[in-house]
Amino acid sequence: MPRSTIAVVDTKRLSAIFGPRDSHLRRIREALGVGIAARGDAIHIDGEEHSVLRATEVFEELDRLAREHGGVERDEVDRLLRIATGEEFAVHRPEPIEVHRPGGQLVAKSPGQAAYVQAIRQHDVVLCTGPAGSGKTFLAVAMAVASLRAEQVKKIVLVRPAVEAGESLGYLPGDLQAKINPYLRPLMDALREMMDYDQLKRLTEQDVVEMIPLAYMRGRTLNHAFIILDEAQNTTIAQMKMFLTRLGIGSKMVISGDTTQIDLPPDRQSGLVDAVRRLRDLPGCGQVTLGGADIVRHSLVQRIVEAYDR
């Protein structure tokens, strides 16, 4: 009977690969029909030749994830098993995104995400639509941080329309920054995943990282900047035109949003929906549509999105 052996060396990493109470190991064993055992600091796999080969590829990728990130999430195991069993197409591992954090690299986790990252690398303006959890904001921020680190841009500008999601927040006390913080919090959360607190604070104070509401973009020209417009489905057509025309020399724009979650009044058309139609064939402007298969939050999020789509 064919057998494969994978040397892991680090027992802590072996524990992460097998999961809490060996839960990852059991999922792999059941999905691929192989026998799996750990002896010493190695994983031994027995079974049919093609099953052993697929299980070996899964464990090698899990070992890489554990080595680079210190742990393995259940969603990663599920994704690798979908690829191994043919439920999801495998893609060549895309070029990693270099960010300011321990570990230093991020990698797209689906074909759609890989296409999104590639579009950002190839175009000066990219429009991305997709459901919650598909990485629209996170990957855009990662690419902005990588561009700043590589000195391809001099600053990062993060922008959101100040539109409430169906409920009034009332009067917010404080200065401008305090008032807009609730709207910009998701962008700040993404940045904190990639930079330590002191570094982010310093860059913000130096105006290298700027977070502003969309209304304050009027009249500006942004040169050598990486500009991200998040929640763009909540812009009007006029606002979107105003934003797009802020693009300066040496700059890059990423515009993202979920067109199924528009919070504008019923009589106003979404600027993102309009821009996707108008700019579809414009040279230099890339467009990417992400789907349920690109969702990388809790695995239940994908099923929730599918339920609402139905």
Image (cartoon, rainbow, N blue to C red):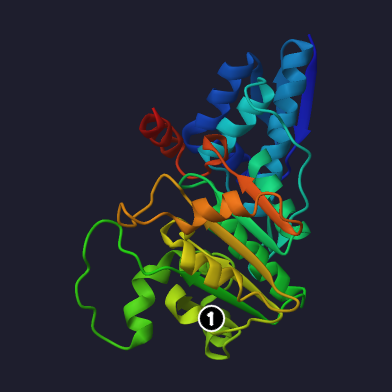
> Residue 266 at x, y = what percent?
30, 52
Disc 1 residue type? Glu
Identity of the residue drawn at 34% across and 57% down: 264
Q: Is residue 52 above or below residue 160?
A: above
Residue 294 position (above or below residue 263): above
* In the foreground, 150 or 269: 269
Q: Residues within 10 Å of mark 1 (few under 14, many from 20)?
A: some
Which percent across, then down, holds residue 203? 58, 84
> Which residue is located at x 69 percent, y 28 percent?
89
Residue matched to label 1:
210
Residue 207 visible here: yes
Tell which of 40 and 125 is nearer to you: 125
The N terminus - image quarter: top right
The answer to which image quadrant residue 255 occupies is bottom right
The total of numbered circles placed on residues is 1
* Residue 61: quarter of image: top right
Q: Residue at x 51, y 79 (%)?
A: 217
Say which quadrant the C terminus sits in.
Answer: top left
